[in-house]
Every structure is written in structure tokens, then in C-alpha cells.
Image (spheres, rainbow, N blue to C red):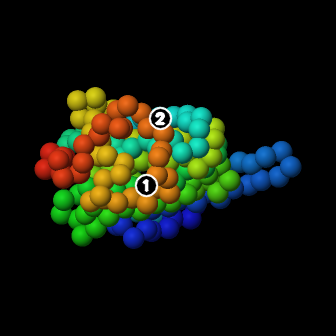
């Protein structure tokens, strides 16, 4: 597994070794032993799977607050997405900065996002399947979000009129929630 650091400390791109032939491919998508050898120590407790049918669907920016925050290992198993991690750690030198990585069924890249980050993605194709591991269980009482087009964060999503859930259209601006995150 190739581990590539990004401009934000702790956010890394994982590229598994893929063995392909005329039948398809095989890859090891997660190995605790391999990750620990790279200095990455995570105990994932929950897997999640989402499906988006239309290109331009945007999910995020989501996070869980306080003691319920989650680290995530994300990947796209069908289609392609622009995946985004936003640093919400108040004492971080990269506070409010973001990293975007294209994840796809073809490149098989994964993004490892530590606790204290907001997360979102926009679909670059129709019919996207997106999977991720989390190191903490979902806690509805800790659910939070930031508006996808927040000017303080200024993510370059590549879409001006994304398809959003009702919940995501009502997410607050960063300045309205920054003091309540608990990171």
C-alpha cells in the first residue's frame, strides 16, 4: 500500500496494490498491520455505504462533534467523486483549510481523514457507490454540518448548483458553529 501525505497533517491518500487480469482485480483495501507499519493507528468500528444516482450530487460538509467525532477511511467503489476533508481542529496550523482528492472505481485511491475534520464529496459521474469506515459509532445527538458553499472554507467543488439533501441546504455557516465543535 502506497501512503501519500497531503498538505494537511494526518490526512493521507492510500493507494492499494491492485492485482488485475482478464477476470478483474483483487486488492487489499484495509490491513491494520500495513497501516500500523506506516504509523497509522486506527480501530474502525463501523462501515457505511452510500449511493448517489446523479452526477453533481453533493453530500456534506458533515462531522460529529466532541467525544463522538470520527476518523474515516473513504473510497469510491463505483463511479467517481471529488472527496473533501476540512480541518476543523481549532489549534491546527491548517485550521479551516481543505484537501480535495478524486476517488474513483478506476484509481482505487482511499482518503484517510483523522478526527476533527469535516467531510464531504460531490459526484463526478452518475451512479456512484461510496463506502467508508469510521472509528466511532454514529451519534445523532452529535451530528453537525457546515454549508457546502461556506465562504470561510471556500471549497472548490467544481459545481455551482449541486443536488443537495434538504438537511444539507439548511446547514449553518462555519462562523455560526465554529465555537461549538469541540475539536
Calculate the distance from the C-alpha at mark 1 to the C-alpha at mark 2. Answer: 17 Å
Q: Residue 68's image quarter?
A: top left
Instruction: Describe residue 15's horizontal placement relative to residue 92 as left or right.
Output: right
Mark closest to the chain's N terminus, 1 or 2: 2
Q: Which residue sits at x=55%, y=50%?
A: 81
Do labels 1 and 2 touch, CB within 8 Å? no
Count of numbered circles in the view: 2
What residue appears at the point 30 percent right and 53 percent down from the top-left corner?
150
Q: Is residue 76 visible?
A: no
Of the pair 66 and 32, the residue shown nearer to us: 66
Most distant residue in the left direction? 179
Out of 53 and 95, give the one closest to the viewer.
Answer: 53
Q: Is residue 83 left or right of residue 105?
A: left
**Residue 84 — which label?**
1
Mark number for residue 143? none
Q: Position of residue 142 (x, y in %)?
A: 24, 35
Q: Note whether 139 is above or below 174 in the view shown.
A: above
Q: Secondary structure at mark 2?
A: strand
The residue under the point 86% across, 49% down is 22
Q: Is residue 95 above or below residue 71?
A: below
Mark 1 surroundings: few (<14), some (14-19) or many (≥20) residues within 10 A: many
| Front residue of 94 and 122 | 122
Q: Which secondary structure, mark 1? A: strand
Q: Which residue is mark 2?
A: 48
Amino acid at each position: 500500500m502506497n501512503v501519500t501525505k497531503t498538505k494537511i497533517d494526518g490526512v493521507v491518500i492510500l493507494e492499494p496494490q491492485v492485482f488485475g487480469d482478464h477476470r478483474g482485480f483483487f486488492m487489499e483495501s484495509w490491513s491494520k498491520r500495513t497501516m500500523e507499519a506506516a504509523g497509522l493507528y486506527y480501530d474502525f468500528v463501523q462501515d457505511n455505504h452510500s449511493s448517489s444516482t446523479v452526477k453533481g450530487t453533493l453530500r456534506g460538509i458533515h462531522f460529529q462533534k466532541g467525544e463522538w467525532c470520527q476518523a474515516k477511511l473513504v473510497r469510491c467503489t463505483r463511479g467517481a467523486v471529488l472527496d473533501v476533508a476540512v480541518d476543523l481542529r481549532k489549534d491546527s496550523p491548517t485550521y479551516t483549510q481543505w484537501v480535495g482528492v478524486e476517488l474513483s472505481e478506476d484509481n482505487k485511491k482511499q482518503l484517510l481523514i483523522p478526527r476533527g475534520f469535516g467531510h464531504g464529496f460531490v459526484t463526478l459521474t452518475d451512479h456512484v457507490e461510496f463506502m467508508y469506515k469510521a472509528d466511532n459509532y454514529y451519534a445523532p445527538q452529535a451530528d453537525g454540518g457546515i454549508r457546502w458553499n461556506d465562504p470561510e472554507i471556500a471549497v472548490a467543488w467544481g459545481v455551482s448548483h449541486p443536488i443537495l439533501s434538504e438537511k444539507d441546504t439548511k446547514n449553518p455557516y462555519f462562523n455560526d458553529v465554529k465555537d461549538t465543535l469541540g475539536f
